[in-house]
Image (cartoon, grey):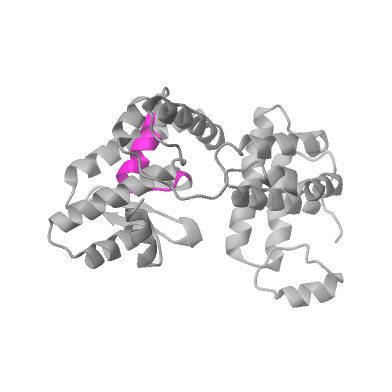
Amino acid sequence: MELGIKRNSGLTYALKYAAKVLKQGIGISKHEVYKRFGGKSPLIHSYSTFNRYMGVAKEFVNWAKEQGLNRLDKVQYEHVRDFLLSKSEYCSMRTLKVNASALRKFFETVGREDIAERIGENYQEIYSKGRAPGRALAFAHPERVISLLKEDVHKVIAELQLLTGARIGDVKKIQVLPEEKKVVITKSKGGRTREIDYSDRPEKFERIKKLVGELREYLKGSSWSSVREGYYRDLRQAVCRSGEIYTGSHAFRVNYVKERLRELRERGYSEKEALQIIEYEIGHSRIEMSAYYSRG
């Protein structure tokens, strides 16, 4: 594949170039590309993988700029390793492996095969630093955990997770529809759009609306990646001070399910009916997952 990028290109240009090249594989069968290139496909063949990989690449580019790295030729493998290991505090081994794969593909595409090869050689070291997979447990006292967070922006993020059941990556996507009293989260996991009706919980809706406004103000002068990393560090320390068990910010999502199940059962819904509603609200495709969360 002939490169249309120079080694000293800016990282922002490199990101746009990689996206332009990699998306050419969407809609083309892997078998056809394998034949064309005589082996492993250099492209990406699904929208979900493309969005996830480019999201990781964008996060790395933002991080690199914060370190004073603006050009492709200034990036070294050690920078990539530091970025990946900085996420090990809150990412599972599986997630770190996906992040490493995404950056390997990115650097292959922009002509930095040297970095791509080093990532491949050190896969095991990288993803072994991640958290072992485990079940997220609800906080016994989530409000106390939130109160112990040091940064106000982190308190906003945590409360939004608690009130909406949002994954951490979805918090910045939260939109409120005042007239309908609904919360909408577009392009959540799996490309799904979550829509939650708060007409039966007007006070919570008003609180969410206020928090969303505050978060937008906080993010005007900060990158989401740096805020999120700081949030995880702050949360781990707050959980430690509270005496709770740390299983990540997903715990707030489990708290949402348990609280919502209680609310719906009190309103007369059967457990199955309540779990079906929650299944839709939290963006899962199987009622078994809602039941699994409710036991967390």
Q: Residue at x 38, y 33 (%)?
A: 244
Horizontal placement of 2 versus 210: left or right? right
**Label tally:** 0
Residue 156 image offset from top left, x and y in percent: 36, 33
Quadrant of residue 144 in the image?
top left
Q: Nearer the viewer, residue 277 or 271?
A: 271
Residue 75 at least partly seen = no
Magenta span main SS: helix
Q: Nearer the viewer, residue 116 or 208?
A: 116
Residue 256 image offset from top left, x and y in percent: 31, 48
Residue 116 image offset from top left, x and y in percent: 80, 49
Vertical order, 1 against 106 (above or below): below
Q: Nearer the viewer, residue 15 or 141?
A: 141
Q: Residue at x 80, y 66 (%)?
A: 40
Q: Magenta stretch containing residue 129, yes or no?
A: no
Quadrant of residue 268 in the image?
bottom left
Horizontal placement of 51 versus 182: left or right? right
Q: Nearer the viewer, residue 97 or 208?
A: 97
Q: Residue at x 33, y 42 (%)?
A: 162
Q: Magenta stretch containing residue 160, yes or no?
A: yes
Which residue is the extreme one toward the top? 150
Q: Quadrant of the image for the N terminus? A: bottom right
Quadrant of residue 49 in the image?
bottom right
Horizontal placement of 82 versus 273: left or right? right
Residue 31 at least partly seen = yes
Residue 245 image offset from top left, x and y in percent: 42, 36
Vertical order, 118 against 269 (above or below): above
Report the magenta residues as a range. 155-168
